[in-house]
Image (cartoon, rainbow, N blue to C red):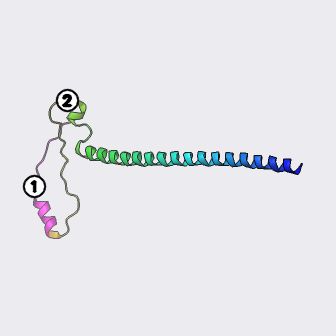
Amino acid sequence: MFSKLKGCFRQSVRAEMGSLLEMQKLLKKKDEKIRELQVQLERKDAEIIELKTKLDKYQSVFKPGMAAMSGTAGPAAVRRRAQGISAEPQSMKTLQDVTKQKFKKYIKSKR
């Protein structure tokens, strides 16, 4: 009877060893798949960064609303900013110069 139990125990241990080896193989396959997916993710992240850099570069060259973007031919209308005094004069001489200087007047249309 003892030998029967001993034989059963051996079979049980062998079965467990077999399933343990199978589990180790499955874990190894999963680890390899995870590594492969991580490499793909790193490549795609690098590609995204590269494409964002290119997009920023192109957007800095081609401003939104340009004629080429809207499909119309010809140069886009250029807006000019108004010039003005941005600060008060620093010295009395500069203040006197500014008060004596005649500025050109522009007539504005009423809308």
Q: Position of residue 51 (x, y in %)?
A: 33, 44
Q: Is residue 97 left or right of residue 55?
A: left
Q: Residue 99, relative to residue 16: is it above or below?
A: below
Nearer to us in this view, 65 or 103:
65
Q: Which mark, residue 23?
A: none
Can residue 99 be found in the magenta stretch?
Answer: yes
Q: Which mark, residue 72?
A: 2
Give, as a three-letter code, the residue at label 1: Lys
Q: Position of residue 57 (x, y in %)?
A: 27, 47
Nearer to us in this view, 99 or 78:
78
Tell me the CA gap for discs 2 and 1.
42 Å
Boundaries of the magenta span = 93-107
Q: Is label 2 in a helix, a strand or a loop?
A: loop
- The residue that appears at 31% across and 48% down in the rendered structure is 53
Residue 111 visible in rendering = no
Nearer to us in this view, 86 or 79:
79
User: Which residue was labeled with disc 1?
Assistant: 102
Q: Residue 31, relative to residue 66: is it above or below?
A: below
Nearer to us in this view, 29 or 74:
29
